[in-house]
Image (spheres, rainbow, N blue to C red):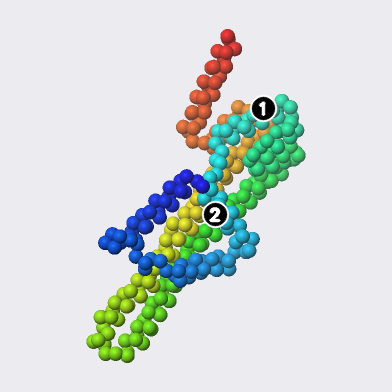
Amino acid sequence: MDFATIIGMIIGISLVAIGMYDFDAGSIPAAFFNLQGLAIVLGGTLAATIINYPASTILSMVRVAGKALGKQYFQNPLSVINQLVEYNKMSRKQGLIALENVLPDIENNYMRIGLENAILEKDPNKLNNFLQNELQNMVIRHRNGQEMFYNMGTYAPAFGLLGTVMGLILMMTTQGETSSVASFADQAQDTTGKLLHGMGIALVTTFYGVLLANLIFIPIAGKLKTRSDEEVHISEIIMAGIQSIHAKEHPLIMEEKLLTFVDKQTRERHRSAQAAAEAAEAEMSEI
């Protein structure tokens, strides 16, 4: 699991538990644990999600959540740029067909299918359309997963409120029936105590809804968006690099073009490292 995700969940659950803790009694009150309320929130959220999305999307929910919570390998933009520059040099020396030898070793699926299409496609406009469509489809797939968890984050508090309303209705009607049996003076104190206790139990469903929405569903959607943005950024670099390779641009021009996708400090560090490597290579050649 992703380290940041673990830390965030531990901090969130710990602070909520501290807020629930009764220091006088030395334990968390039993009122916070209500299976009926939890069933209303989780069951209602799941049912609304099933109604809103097709079965294929629902079945992929676990996989999408695993992608958000699991550790993901993040490609360094500079390493991607260096890789594309090397492929450019190879294609200029041996032709685009030479890139077929490296395709099986490319881990990035977008880069692999993009280079494969660049080898086969002669028309740059058709190649550009293919790369744009693949990137757009990727964005749509990612957006569907994000949207699903964002919607679950809105459903959960709503069903929590529904459970609270249901509990208050039952509490009021029950107490109204029991209080009519005896005199109001004899039952006033007992009825008030039962009302407060019942209201506390009814509010637990709202607590579950807010907790699940803000600690589970919405953070998962946010994590998916962050990772999607990272993957799309890398894919945009790859798309520009493949277009340059296909156009047979000079590697130096291509590298400068791709470096515009990274921030200024990263570009400066990259150029400093390149200058140091060239200086070391020059010294070795003199020796």
**Residue most toward the top?**
287
Q: Nearer the viewer, residue 201 or 126?
A: 201
Does 282 sit above or below residue 32? above
Question: Which quadrant of the figure has residue 64?
Answer: bottom right
Residue 91 shows in this picture: yes
Residue 254 shows in this picture: no
Question: Which quadrant of the figure has residue 209?
Answer: bottom left
- Structural distance between the alpha carbons of marks 2 and 1: 40 Å
The number of callouts visible is 2
Residue under label 2: 65
Classify 10 Å Cα crowding around label 1: few (below 14), some (14-19), many (20 and above).
some
Does 94 sit above or below residue 63? above
Does 150 sit above or below residue 130? below
Tell us which disc is closer to us: 2 or 1: 2
Left or right of 245 in this view: 79 = left
Specify the label residue 57 is tagged with.
Answer: none
Amino acid under disc 2:
Ala
Q: Residue at x 59, y 12 (%)?
A: 285
Q: Secondary structure at mark 2?
A: helix
Q: Secondary structure at mark 1?
A: helix
Q: What quarter of the picture does the C terminus occupy?
A: top right
Does 286 sit above or below residue 24? above
Where residue 237 appears, as percent x and y from the top left, is 59, 39
Residue under label 1: 89
Where residue 58 appears, as percent x and y from the top left, is 60, 61
Amino acid under disc 1:
Lys
Classify 10 Å Cα crowding around label 2: few (below 14), some (14-19), many (20 and above).
some
Q: Residue at x 57, y 30 (%)?
A: 256
Q: Residue at x 55, y 33 (%)?
A: 78
| First of labels 2, 1 by sequence position | 2
Left or right of 207 in this view: 185 = left
